[in-house]
Amino acid sequence: MLLAAGLGTRMRPLTDDTPKPLIRAGGKTLLDHNLDQLETAGIETVVVNVHYFAEQIEAHCARRSAPRILISDERAALLDSGGGVRKALPLLGDGPFFCLNADTIWLNGPRSNLRRMAEFFDPAAMDILLMVAPTVTTIGWGNRGDFRLLQDGRLERTGRHEVVPFAYCGAAILKPALFGNRPEIFSLNRLFDEAQEAGRLYGLRLDGLFMHVGTPDALAEAESALRLRVF
């Protein structure tokens, strides 16, 4: 699942007439950065949700030959991240699936990080697996971090006034069962909190360079990093 329905308000004025997933970084749209990562990891079918300038995203997806792309239409109303996934469940199948944000990109180390996640994911122990990266090396990251990564791989979310060392990279593995009896509109953060409380929220450290492309300034930083191609 690739979450591409947001309004991109923090990226204005670049998103005044273009949806954020179609903003280019390093000569490639943010959407294609993520679709290429999924294709490299061997994912054959991807669900993309659409709302803002939906027709532009649909037309762009139609020009790709791989992976196969299915559209989840949210033109009627934005459903937030969790609600968007919940609406798309009939297209996602019965097993655990990747869920990616369209405004986060990364450069891999020697191996695909999504493949590493798939190998690390243990459904007996984990409800959710998140890819995380050190905040000190992250491009375009403007806050104090999201999680503490414990020695056994479990994640703990930051408190209100805590500074923690890891940022969420916008790539997760989720179980369909997590979305039962949920409201139409809700955030994935609700599922992250519940999994943490149950001791079933895990993280895998990114091998590479993470870029959060949420603002024009962050986009400029990402462009510089992509030109250097240090990974």
Image (cartoon, rainbow, N blue to C red):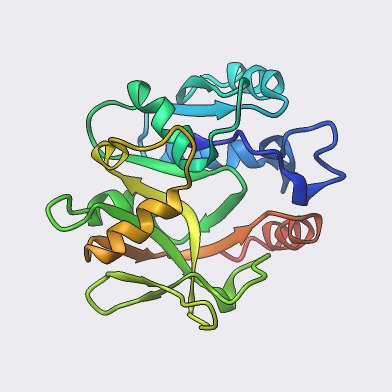
Q: How far across and down, in percent of the image, does residue 73 sit?
A: 55, 20
Closest to the observer: 206 or 101?
101
Residue 137 lies in quadrant: bottom right
> Residue at coordinates 53% horizontally, 73% vertically from top-left?
145
Residue at image position (50%, 22%) is 72
Tally the numbered discs: 0
Residue 181 at what x, y percent from top left?
30, 35
- The N terminus lies in which quarter of the figure? top left
Q: Position of residue 192 (x, y in %)?
A: 37, 57
Q: Quadrant of residue 97?
A: top left
The answer to whether 44 appears left or right of 14 in the picture is: left
| Residue found at the far bottom of this picture | 162
Does residue 74 appear left or right of residue 127 in this picture? Answer: right
The residue closer to the viewer here, 134 or 39, is 134
Q: Is residue 94 visible?
A: yes
**Residue 1 shows up from this direction:** no
Q: What residue appears at the point 28 percent right and 43 percent down from the top-left corner?
A: 178
Quarter of the picture containing the C terminus is bottom right
User: Toward the viewer: 1 or 108?
Assistant: 1
Residue 221: image location, x then y, percent: 75, 63
Eyeballing the image, is 162 above or below 189? Answer: below
Placement of 33 over or under 63, stated as above or below: below
Asked if 164 appears above or below 221 in the picture, the reply is below
Left or right: 170 as drawn, with respect to 213: left
